Amino acid sequence: MKLAVILPAAGLGTRMLKGNVPAPAESSGISRKQFMLLEGAPILVHTVRKFVASPLVYEIVVAVREEDIDWVRDLLLPETKSLLGDLKVVAGGQSRQQSVEHALAALDPDTDYVAVHDAVRPFIELDTIRKVVEEAVANGAAIVGIVPVDTVKQVSGAQATGAKVRSTIPRERLVLAQTPQVFRAELLRRAYEAAAADGFTGTDESSLVERLDQVEVSVVMGSERNIKITRPSDMDLARLLFSQEKS
């Protein structure tokens, strides 16, 4: 089995912590979450290390902004020497979906399975990677998810202000999708081709695959530790989780 991991990391995001990114990004006046430093290394590097440590991973493809390709490749090459396959750094797009599409085009034709993972989820556990890959191999498509702990309401009107509750959605029928999301390579390629043909934009890879109605996407239970770092307050939690990993 030949498994490739795609890490979309081309987003500009918003400024979170000024001066807390490597020099190439800082010199352009941009603070981007995937390059913010967590205990001395960019978040992207921590994420890459997790997949390099998995014996299931053959190659890693990282999609970044075109002007970042060279220095990101130099940053990541020392981290990926133990990969059986290659590290590829490609130009992403204006959206996550475009970035993954560009990365898909860079994969070797004989790639069997593709895992797509958020570049800013550096605390994915190796056992979770193994479980979701095994489920995808068995059924063609699998994602990581967790059960929500809060009560979920369906509302009408603007969510920020003036929303009115219309119903309460049973939590036992809900999961909050995480990554990695793993698919047979040819299935994911077809999903992206169909989305492009229809002008459809999804919020994750599973939403594109679901539209094909060819396989049922399985869910593997994840962990609340598998956080997506998106806000300044997430960095405090990230530092705590990192210290726990190292203890």
Image (tube, helix red, strand yellow):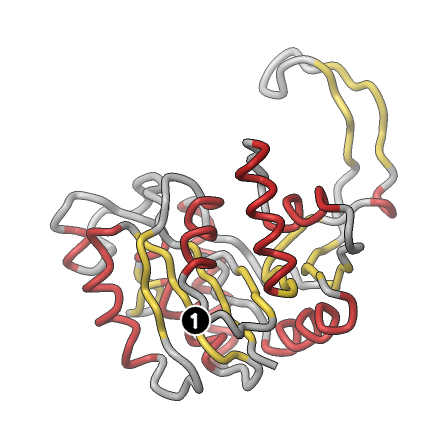
The residue drawn where x is 23% and y is 46% is 18
- In the rendered picture of this protein, how many numbered marks are placed on residues? 1
Q: Quadrant of residue 115?
A: bottom right
Q: Residue at label 1?
A: 60
Residue 57 image offset from top left, x and y in percent: 52, 79
Foreground of the two, 115 or 200: 200
Residue 247 image offset from top left, x and y in percent: 50, 81
Foreground of the two, 200 or 167: 200
The residue drawn where x is 74% and y is 47% is 148
Residue 140 image offset from top left, x and y in percent: 73, 65
81 horizontally vs 98: left or right:
left
Q: Quadrant of residue 201?
A: top right
Foreground of the two, 221 or 37: 221
214 horizontally vs 25: left or right:
right
User: What secondary structure is found at the residue carrying circle 1?
Assistant: strand
> Against 75, is 213 above or below?
above
Q: Quadrant of residue 136?
A: bottom right
Q: Quadrant of the N terminus?
A: bottom right
Residue 188 image offset from top left, x and y in percent: 60, 56
Foreground of the two, 69 or 27: 69
> Against 142, is 93 above or below?
above
The residue drawn where x is 49% and y is 45% is 97
The residue drawn where x is 62% and y is 49% is 191
Badge 1: how crowded within 10 Å, few (<14), some, or many (20+)? many
